[in-house]
Image (spheres, coloured by chain):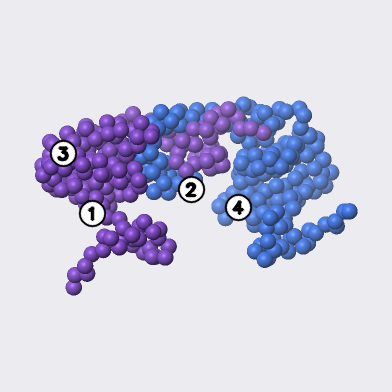
Chain colours: A purple, B blue
Amino acid sequence: MSFSPLIRHLIDSLRILPGVGQKTAQRMALQMLERDRSGALRLAQALTQAMNGVGHCKQCRSLSEDDVCQLCLDPRRDDSVLCVVEGPMDVYAVEHTGFRGRYFVLKGHLSPLDGLGPEAIGIPELLTRIAAGSFSEVILATNPTVEGEATAHYIAQLLAGKGLIASRIAHGMPLGGELELVDGGTLAHSIAGRRPILL
Amino acid sequence: MSFSPLIRHLIDSLRILPGVGQKTAQRMALQMLERDRSGALRLAQALTQAMNGVGHCKQCRSLSEDDVCQLCLDPRRDDSVLCVVEGPMDVYAVEHTGFRGRYFVLKGHLSPLDGLGPEAIGIPELLTRIAAGSFSEVILATNPTVEGEATAHYIAQLLAGKGLIASRIAHGMPLGGELELVDGGTLAHSIAGRRPILL
């Protein structure tokens, strides 16, 4: 037997959520219908409000309901360091480390095979932002993937000769990891990037 | 830093979905905002339509957009067997086994500690349905939990002397299981319920 049209449509629509397959979507749909219809209606409203009300900050291009986000407006932050990341989620991740400089959010990474060049991911806007600011260092915190590395190097080349330090986040052993389990590339980076122990 | 109010409200609202915690809800919210706003708006619409449009079938009490569901209306099904389950999801599970009789969906199981007595889970309606039908067998397919067993036995007692067979789904080894891994109760049921091999 198949589900009725409205339930089927709801199940299909739930599958846009990351990590939600057919089986999970079925469980979600039926559970909401059976146990939490008011919660589901609140979710529908929250979705509509967020999709219509949340835009991008003009300055850092992260998600924001205002023209310029709270983070960019905050006068207590360090105006000399800019952290460049691939997406808004990364801003929250870096923020948890205690970093208190400024951010710029790219639209992902360079991916020539998918037709994503410097314009598509917002590199011209990044250069405009850097020119308008008073940064002494730009931290390139794109992901440690092939595309993320290429994007970081591309930006570093553009910044050469502009009197800025372009730095890259360190690669190495994750805390709590085990040498015998980590991949060779990571361990090689970890050895090459070794630092003297200061006593 | 915290998320902006609309994003925070969306994250909170997503947490009503089964199996979705804080971290997953964040990822879902940001991914929809970044990559699939039209999909999210379609989801909002599907949620609203389903919550407002889907009710319960008058006859089997499963989820249905119509007064009586397609399954109850289907004239090709076996009117002599009624399968009693705890929820609409169970109907879809039993349907996959090839069962083609009729269904009745309880609202969960008896749970005196939570104040859920026979009326709360719809047992009077079940008796009305059985009286109105021409069933020769009622399969009690509540879950093999303490509450599900108690509910099945309670219903079986009510049906005693009404000229009906009240049967219970078999307990035993799940296919592909291993004797050394299965719990003792299941294995005991499996031994007690052994059947001669017909050659």
Q: Secondary structure at mark 4?
A: loop
Q: Which mark is residue B176?
A: none
What residue type is disc 1 on?
Answer: Gly
Q: CA distance from mark 1 to mark 2?
A: 30 Å
Q: Are marks 4 and 2 in contact (CB under 8 Å)?
A: no
Q: In the rendered image, which quarter is residue A6 located in?
A: top right
The chain letter under disc 3 is A
Q: Secondary structure at mark 3?
A: helix
Q: Position of residue A144 (x, y in %)?
A: 33, 49
User: Which residue in the structure is indicated by mark 3?
Assistant: A130
Quadrant showing the N terminus of chain A: top right
Q: Position of residue A34 (x, y in %)?
A: 55, 39
Q: Is residue A183 depicted above or below B37 in this figure?
A: below
Q: Earlier in the sequence, mark 1 or mark 3?
A: 1
Q: Earlier in the sequence, mark 4 or mark 2?
A: 2
User: Which residue in the structure is indicated by mark 4?
Assistant: B111
